[in-house]
Structure formats: C-alpha cells, structure tokens
Amino acid sequence: MCDIVGKHRARGKRKTIVIVAEGAIAADLTPITSKDVLKVLVDRLGLDTRVTTLGHVQRGGTAVAWDRILATLQGVEAVEAVLQSTPETPSPMIGIVENKICRKPLVEAVKLTKQVAQAISEKNFKKAISLRDSEFVEHLSNFMAINSADHNEPVLPLEQRLNIAIR
C-alpha cells in the first residue's frame, strides 16, 4: 500500500482513498484496522490522514432500478423454491452468479463458506481464492491490475506510441 501511495504522490496525485474491509487480515492472519492503516500512512509517508467509518446507510446509497429488479427476480425465485419444495427438499439459498439468479442448498453454501475460512486460517490463499466464484476471481484480478504500483508505466517504446487528440 505504501509503495503504491508513494508512487502516486511522486506522480503528483494529491489525494488517496484507502478502503479497509471489515474483518481485513494481513498475510500472517493478524487483523488490519483503519487505525493501523492511518498509523502507517502517517508514520511512513507523513500524510495528513483521516478515517471515516461508513455506517450501514452510507454503504449502499439510494436504490436504483437494478437493485429493484434484482430483489424482484430473487423474490420470484424464492417463491418458486417454496412452491416446488417437498419435505425432503433442502433449504435453499437464492443468489446471483454471473448475473443469473441461482438456487443452491443452503447447507452447501455454508459448507463452501467454511472451506474458504479454513483455507484462509491455513494461510492457503490460493485455495481460498479458488473456492470463490468466477466473478470474485475476475474482480480480484482487475483490482490487482488497477492498483499495481507500476500500472502507468509505458508499454510501448516512445517511437511506437500514438498521440490522440479530441476536438
């Protein structure tokens, strides 16, 4: 993080937003808090740093059409699950995978979640990532590409670069 923020500052970027997820942990499994991040940014980089903790209302924002459509589609699937269930049918979990509503047994979903937690506790991060759905892997890959310290380095030699003007 310090490497990336430092390089951004060296390039003239004056503002940085660092988001710390609830339950964030370091590679050694120690918790990472917003106060820890603040201390590192102040001590190592000498940055004027503030922490803002978002409440539950601030996280989601105002619902948009997609939110309402998604809730309706999941509601329809939940009703269909109830109508199709028998006493032997396992309790379902209604979710979304690759923009498609899906239904799977709740026990399986919980088991998979526990496997991810187990892999993390064993510091087997590759396994933990592989247990997640394909969208998670894709989003992680995109996040890592966007947030690499050297993503602004030129790919082509100077003589092969193009200039683009918009008028």
Image (cartoon, rainbow, N blue to C red):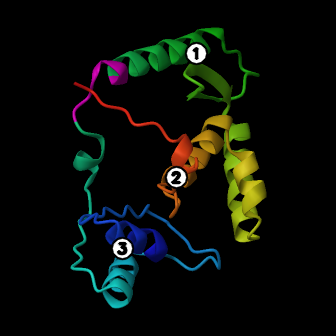
Membership of 91 in magenta stretch: no
State how far apart marks 1 and 2 are (Cα): 56 Å
Residue for point 68% across, 44% down: 132
Residue for point 62% across, 76% down: 29
Percent position (x, y) of residue 115?
75, 54
- Which residue type does callout 2 highlight? Pro
**Left or right of 37, for residue 165:** left
* Viewer-proximal residue among 112 and 29: 29
Percent position (x, y) of residue 10?
35, 72
* Viewer-proximal residue among 42 and 133: 42
Q: Which comes before the other along the chain, label 2 or label 3? A: 3
Q: Is residue 101 above or below residue 152?
A: above
Q: Which comes before the other along the chain, label 3 or label 1? A: 3
Q: List the residue tagged with mark 1.
A: 82
In the image, the segment drawn in magenta is 62-67
Q: List the residue tagged with mark 3.
A: 34
State how far apart marks 2 and 3 are (Cα): 33 Å
Q: Secondary structure at mark 2?
A: loop
Label 3–label 1 contact, CB within 8 A: no
Label disc, if present, on residue 38 of the rendered structure = none
Front: mark 3 or 1: 3
Membership of 66 in magenta stretch: yes
Q: Secondary structure at mark 1?
A: helix
Q: List the residue tagged with mark 2.
A: 154
